[in-house]
Amino acid sequence: MKGLEEARAFYEDFGREMLHSRFPAFEDRIAAGLAGRGSECFGFDDAISRDHDFEQGFCLWLTDADDLLIGEELSRAYRELPRRRASQQSRLGETNRGVRRIGFFYRRYLGSETAPRTWQEWLQLPSWALAEATNGEVFRDDLGAFSALRETLLYGMPEDVRKKKLAARLIGMAQSGQYNYARCLRHGEEGAAMLALAEFVREGCGAIYLLNRAHMPYYKWALRGMEKLPLLAQMREAFTFLLTAENDESGRRVKQDVVEDICANVIAALREQGLSDGTQDFLEPHAFAVQERIENPEIRNLHIMEG
């Protein structure tokens, strides 16, 4: 059973009754679910994932006022639930199960207890942070306070900010994959060429998530997460090939063809979304076309690579 499924089952079997019997006056004010850091929150966990930083359980999110009233008592009640022993915790790991204030949960990812208020705040937030703040599942949220902020983070990014971030990813793809990979090979710099390919994959993944209006997770899960995207999910295999295939003479020629094929698919998606009407094969002019479609002049006048 996946960790997210196990968390829901644990909540249904034990958590729901605990809230109903011990906190009836607050039952419809407590949000329950599982979200945040950890492969299980994305649905990517397997047997190996449980060797560290894994803990059976779920999250209970409270408003500040409710936490002052019942936070300690609710935490004790949660710890009394019949959970299995947690796995070893790494020095960089920390549990995200149990009772948390809503604001504290979001502050970890946003640096604030509220949604971004300005385009500058949206532009500066890294995609992995937005992905972790909105992954997983909310099992119950009658009050709606936790889910309201979650919905804003999922769907509230200003379109001009999405375009700016996308333009930056596109110019990065053009520079690293279509230009510098072959150029580094001609210089005899094979290590630099492989770094260029890795940069192309990173920028390309970011572009595809933005074309899907989705947040790209932590690099380890960026390719895996593409499986769930409705648009250009098939590029996952092409990116994997670029990173894993032999880099001998024949492999280099194939990789350059794969780079161009990925770019062609991205350009087609840009045209379909009305973000570019250019016919060039090189991504650079398409990046500028996206930037030119930004309505806010302050955002439009930022450097093409900013974002």
Image (tube, grey):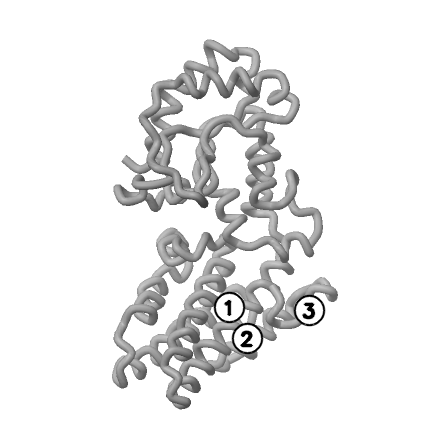
- Answer whether labels 2 and 1 touch (C-beta < 8 Å): yes
Which residue is at the front of the view, 44 or 159?
A: 44
Q: Is residue 99 above or below residue 113?
A: above
Q: Where is residue 306 in the image (x, y as percent from the top left)?
A: 62, 67
Camera-near label (3 vs 1) is 3
Circle 2 sits in a helix, a strand or a loop, which is it?
helix
Q: Distance between the residues labelled 3 and 1?
A: 20 Å
Does the rendering let one see residue 72? yes
> Which residue is disc 1 drawn over?
270
Which residue is at the front of the view, 107 or 224?
A: 107
Q: Is residue 269 above or below residue 140?
A: below
Circle 3 sits in a helix, a strand or a loop, which is it?
loop
Q: Distance between the residues labelled 2 and 3?
A: 16 Å
Residue 25 left/right relative to 230: right
The amino acid marked with disc number 3 is Leu
Camera-near label (2 vs 3) is 3
Q: Position of residue 232 (x, y in %)?
A: 40, 62
Mark 1 or mark 2, which is nearer the start of the sequence?
1
The amino acid marked with disc number 2 is His
Q: Where is residue 184 in the image (x, y as percent from the top left)?
A: 42, 84
Most extreme residue toward the front is 91
Circle 1 sits in a helix, a strand or a loop, which is it?
helix
The amino acid marked with disc number 1 is Leu
> Which residue is disc 2 drawn over?
286
Q: Residue at x 65, y 42 (%)?
A: 112
Q: Which residue is drawn at 53% across and 15% down?
A: 73
Q: Which residue is drawn at 39% across and 90% down?
A: 186
Q: Distance between the residues labelled 2 and 1?
A: 8 Å
Crowding at dot 1, Cα within 10 Å, few <14 / some 14-19 / many 20+, comes out as: many
Q: Where is residue 113 in the image (x, y as percent from the top left)?
A: 64, 38
Q: Indicate the quadrant containing the C terminus: top left, top right, bottom left or bottom right.
A: bottom right
